Image: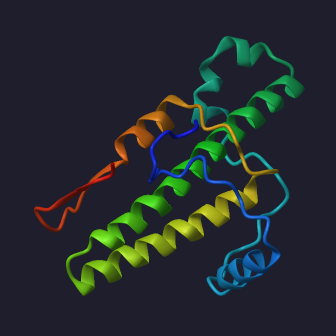
Amino acid sequence: MKSTKPWDVAGFALPATETDRLHRLLNAALENRSLAQPTAPSLYWHAPYFGFDRVSVFQDASAEEQCAILQRANQALLQEAYFIEKAGMGYMAKMVLLAETTEERQLYSLFTADEATHFAQIAALLPAPPTDAHDPFLGLLQERSPTTTNPFCNSSFKSS
């Protein structure tokens, strides 16, 4: 989902850095936030979560097929969460800039840090960073994020 906007708040098209120095700094900062290391890949959501337990095609599938279906569904949710957190970092950073008081800036800065932490946690659960953000929900999220209104005041900011 390549953005044509000069300033894409969602940031879905932002590349990952290749700079080792930046990776070291980021990893050190995230380690200070006490992130738990992910365990071996597993299923985080099971058949009832998706309603698969009520679908005859799933019920009739072999155990191996059911496992493959669940793995793909789990990966899809993790990828969606990855892009939601990525967009959250951009949106919250923008809100930091829109803040009209020190306390608002503090609050949004804390939210931004939480989004960055969540992003790192989700990214650690994926085998590789997803590159395809073609998802109807993510498209809506990206479409809605260029215009931001600060909920603490009457002003608004529009990206051009």
Q: Locate residue 121: give its quadrant.
A: bottom right
Q: Is residue 79 left or right of residue 63?
A: left
Q: Is residue 100 left or right of residue 140?
A: left
| Depicted 38 relative to depicted 66: above or below | below
Q: Locate residue 19: give its quadrant.
A: bottom right
Q: How far across and how far down the image is residue 11, in percent?
A: 53, 52
Q: Nearer the viewer, residue 80 or 96?
A: 96
In this rendering, the count of numbered labels is 0
Q: How far across and how far down the image is residue 88, in percent?
A: 46, 58
| Depicted 42 relative to depicted 123: above or below | above
Q: Is residue 112 left or right of residue 49?
A: left
Q: Nearer the viewer, residue 121 or 149?
A: 149
In the picture as drawn, the residue positioned furthest to the left comes out as 154
Colour convention: rainbow
Q: How far across and how far down the image is residue 148, in percent?
A: 28, 54
Q: Nearer the viewer, residue 49 or 2?
A: 2
| Depicted 82 relative to depicted 48: above or below | below
Q: Please state, as top left, top right, bottom left or bottom right, where the N terminus lies in the image.
A: top right
Seen at 53% across and 56% down, the residue is 85
Q: Locate residue 122: give its quadrant.
A: bottom right
Q: How far across and how far down the image is residue 56, in percent?
A: 68, 12
| Depicted 112 relative to depicted 11: above or below | below
Seen at 50% across and 71% down, the residue is 114
Seen at 58% across and 38% down, the residue is 2
Q: Is residue 89 left or right of residue 46?
A: left
Seen at 56% across and 68% down, the residue is 116
